[in-house]
Image (cartoon, helix red, strand yellow):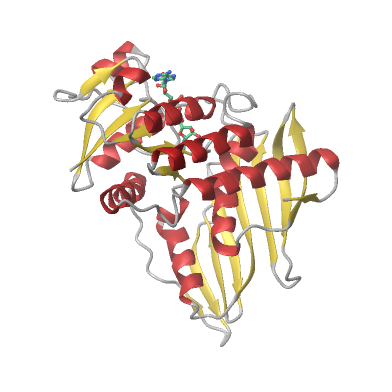
Amino acid sequence: MVRVGIVGIGFMGMIHYLAYQKVRGVKVTAICEKIPERLAGDWRGIKGNFGPAGRKMDLSGIARYSELQELVADPNVDVVDVCLPPSLHPEATIAGLEAGKHVFCEKPIALTMAAADAMVKTAKKKGKLLLIGHVLPFFASYRFAYDTVVSGKFGKILGGHFTRVISDPLWLRDFYDPNVCGGPAIDLHIHDAHFIRLLFGMPKSVQSVGRMRGEVAEFFQSHFLYDDPQVTVSATSGVIRQQGRPFTNGYEIHLEKATLVFDSWMNMPVTVLTEDGKVKRPKIPVRDPVDDFAAEMAEVARCVKMGTTSAFLDGELARDALRLAHKQTESIIKRRPVKV
Ligand SMILES: NC(=O)c1ccc[n+]([C@@H]2O[C@H](COP(=O)([O-])OP(=O)(O)OC[C@H]3O[C@@H](n4cnc5c(N)ncnc54)[C@H](O)[C@@H]3O)[C@@H](O)[C@H]2O)c1
């Protein structure tokens, strides 16, 4: 049995808790939260942009702490699952690792490269796993793309465009604060930066053009530049200033013998255009988002049981994604390409 202690019972802490209930061989044994009602099981005030509404929970049998140090010291916890705001990821992660626990931390790994480096270094020093919750490869539409690309059945990957655009998330108080959430590049686009890193490796440089909001990028177009001039990779990311656009994402991935398309905003399901002119709609399961997270938690449990890192959730991959997001912001500010 893999025993998990969740730190931070907000939107993601709740989703993680619900997802763990769907994974065999995993048990939430402890939670840590500052808000007393949430610690007592009243999750009705918790809100997010998907998943069920918060409700009253029966948390009997689960150890409950208001201090992080108490949870990381709990001998009934094997994995510390960090669902705190990004600014608090490094402190909680390092405390968990130093206490001899594996750590599964929500994305982004951290706000600064120095903090991400310290997290990776501590995991190595302690010989523990550092996994970061980049959930995109566990969403069926993105997993289909990943599996299709790595299968090689349509030849080499030539490039792709990745989109992630939302209406201003007014309910997220600190979203644009570079010292709390990091803004649209660090907290939102990073999903695509991570997926691009997975599919194409690290680019040599990035070139982004965009609107800033204070110190953070608000809306931006990016090109990821590789040695091979044939490889064309780009992304559109960020926030529009109007309401009414739900969370939308999508991709168009070019392979030698097929193009994969998905666009949640245009209601375009995953579609495969093949070189013989056929348009195919593979059967992609439409499932409860909590099930996508359950698939991610199952991967965490597998890694802990096997003592190996994950091809998707590895901490160093997440650090690369953070580096890309920072370099993109630097490119917007400097108005020129920036070496990665
Ligand atoms: N993977 C995804 O799709 C996805 C979606 C949303 C958020 N996230 C990420 O999840 C993380 C959490 O975001 P959220 O939306 O759940 O935030 P949130 O603000 O809803 O929840 C954070 C919780 O942590 C608690 N908290 C704060 N400091 C604490 C401390 N020192 N000790 C204990 N509890 C403390 C708060 O009271 C709150 O309940 C962020 O990194 C965010 O980027 C990921």
Residue 175: where, in percent of width, then height? 59, 27
- Asked if 26 appears above or below 227 in the picture, the reply is above
- Asked if 303 appears above or below 253 in the picture, the reply is above
Residue 312: where, in percent of width, then height? 45, 54
The N terminus - image quarter = top left
Instruction: Let me know if residue 112 appears in the view.
Output: no
Residue at 63% from the left image edge and 32% from the top image edge: 183
**Residue 281 location, quadrant:** bottom left
Task: Single out the residue that lies furthest toward the right.
Answer: 335
- Asked if 302 appears above or below 285 in the picture, the reply is above
Out of 217 and 276, give the one closest to the viewer: 217
Report the side of 102 relative to 58 (left or right).
right
Residue at 73% from the left image edge and 49% from the top image edge: 221
Ligand 1 sits in quadrant? top left
Report the side of 94 relative to 251 (left or right).
left
Report the side of 206 relative to 21 (left or right).
right
